[in-house]
Amino acid sequence: MAGNRQFFVSLLLLMLVPAAAQARDVPLNSLGTSAGKAQRRADGTLLLRPGATVRTDFAIRDGHGVSAQVERRDRCSTNLQVTARLGDQAASSPIGRTTRTAFWGLTAPAGTTRVSLTLTQPRDRAKNARTKKRRVRAKTRGARTKARGKPNARGKAKGRGKAKAARRPVRSRGPRRKRPRRKVAAARPCQASVLLKGLTVLERLPVNAAMTAAHFGQDPFYQALFPQHFDGLTPENELKWESTEPQQGQFTFEAGDRVVNWAIANGEYVRGHVLVWDFQNSDYVTNPKDFYLLQHHWKRAELIAVMQEHILNVVAHFRGRIPEWDVVNEAFNDDGSYKNNVWYQVIGPEYIALAFRLAHQADPQAKLFYNDLGYEAGGPHTQAVLNMVRSLREQGVPIDGVGLESHFDISAGPVTDRMRPVMQAFADLGMAEEITELDVNAGPGTDKLAAEAELYRQVARACLEQIACQRITTWGYTDRYSWLGSDRQGLPFDVNYQPKPAWQALQSEARPGI
Ligand code: XIL
């Protein structure tokens, strides 16, 4: 009972968790200014006068808002408003004397987008209305005064005062005395201005997790809690070779369809994992297990045909539902040499290019990734993947991105600094990047949770800093079902679905602000 209450309280609290967003600063010195109206100051800020527009083309993830740090620099009574534009959306807000931050809820898809601010001086409607009223009143008063003074055609006065006017004899007031006009010093027109001190685009960084059909329908919380926390999922095992083609030429998609359709029905994004790997293959692919025998078991052309049939069928089956695939998984050893798996043995290193071409043939819209672990933080393994990606690009192979699995050990230490140059190097090759299988092998004991959270924060930071990094996926979400084992405490939620410090860390990095 108490457990139930606790569960519902945490459910309620977690529903309040805001959408994932990250603030990306637009450098003020990158802003182009409209001549004359905007003035760049020595401290890097920009002074805007009405009519000024500042703009830049800026690479963003999924844009979710623009915010500006501003300050009114005048004491004019004029209304000022700033119109912000993000891509093809625009919105305005007034800049009052006390406004420090202005926020506009604008959205734009990932990519290079136009960001601009325009300062305008809208016509003050209230003031205009007051002036108009005053004028109308003055006019009516004038008309009445005239009316009181003049009898109408039948000798009667018009209007309210007609009785009195009729009784009162019309008296001449003599020449009207002119009131001396108050002398007003010719005021200089008030110069309105706003100081732009900062400009930020709020972005969403999707946080996903792996899910498996193995617990669907068995555990009331597993599916119920997931959609409130995560933006998407990767089927943990259901799309692997042994699941999708257990016998040669016989495809089974029940489990895969179950996870994928459930995800889509809940508005979740799906990553496809994985087409070609050395693990979780069907026996007919990897038997006999002995590599020496294996390379004689398959003729090269035969194994290529097997790979072709598999990729074309699996990718085509999910076309339109799975927008991105891990095409090849874990092809290298940590020393940078190719893994001596069945594909390498029989086909040679070209199996990688071939797999990408086949996946592209099956779904030209799908984004295609190479996925690996142990190369996130530099070393010969990283170099090998970089060389491979470069070579694939040179050959015109359709590869869109790399997945950094990020299965870290608690002893990994601060990793942001080591991941940063690696992520930059792949971005420089034009690759999209994702953290695809994040978990931290922490081991038992509550004293490990703070260090685990710090590692989560470090990995999230590395992704956030690199614009090419577009998603973080954790490998499962509850320690209850982690592939590492529950006692390793690798995931952001504990065995009772309670958020751990690792989840708070992920939230505060990937989901600050809105
Ligand atoms: C793991 C799954 O989580 C386990 O359930 C399964 O028994 C073995 O595979 N790298 C990958 C993932 O690319 O597919 C692996 O998933 C973990 C390591």
Image (cartoon, helix red, strand yellow):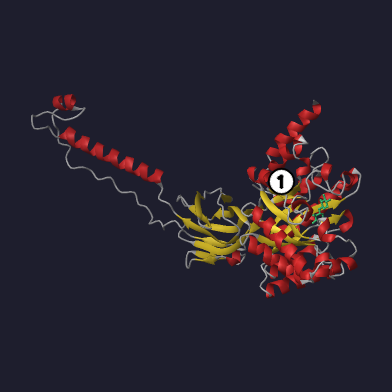
Mark 1, residues whose alpha carbon is within 10 Å: few (<14), some, or many (≥20)? Answer: few
The location of residue 334, given as percent across then percent down, is: 86, 66
What is the total number of numbered labels drawn onto the structure image? 1
Residue 213 appears in which quarter of the rendering? top right
Vertical arrangement, residue 447 with respect to residue 111, above or below: above
Residue at 14% x, 26% y: name it: 166
Q: Nearer the viewer, residue 284 or 291?
A: 284
Q: Nearer the viewer, residue 40 or 322?
A: 322
Residue at 81% x, 47% y: name it: 491
Left/right of residue 192 with respect to residue 359 in the rendered view = left
Q: Nearer the viewer, residue 492 or 90?
A: 492
Residue at 83% x, 41% y: name it: 480
Q: Nearer the viewer, residue 431 or 309?
A: 309
* Residue 257 in sight: yes
Amino acid on which disc 1 is placed: Glu
* Residue 465 in sight: no
The location of residue 212, given as percent across then percent down, is: 76, 46
Q: Which residue is mark 1?
A: 254
Residue 263 appears in which quarter of the rendering? top right
Left/right of residue 91 with respect to residue 371 in the rendered view = left
The location of residue 266, given as percent across then percent down, is: 65, 42
Left/right of residue 377 with respect to residue 366 in the rendered view = right
The quarter of the picture where the N terminus appears is: top right
Vertical arrangement, residue 369 with respect to residue 228, above or below: below
- Secondary structure of the residue carrying tag 1 is helix
Q: Is mark 1 within 8 Å of ligand 1?
A: no
The location of residue 307, given as percent across then percent down, is: 74, 63
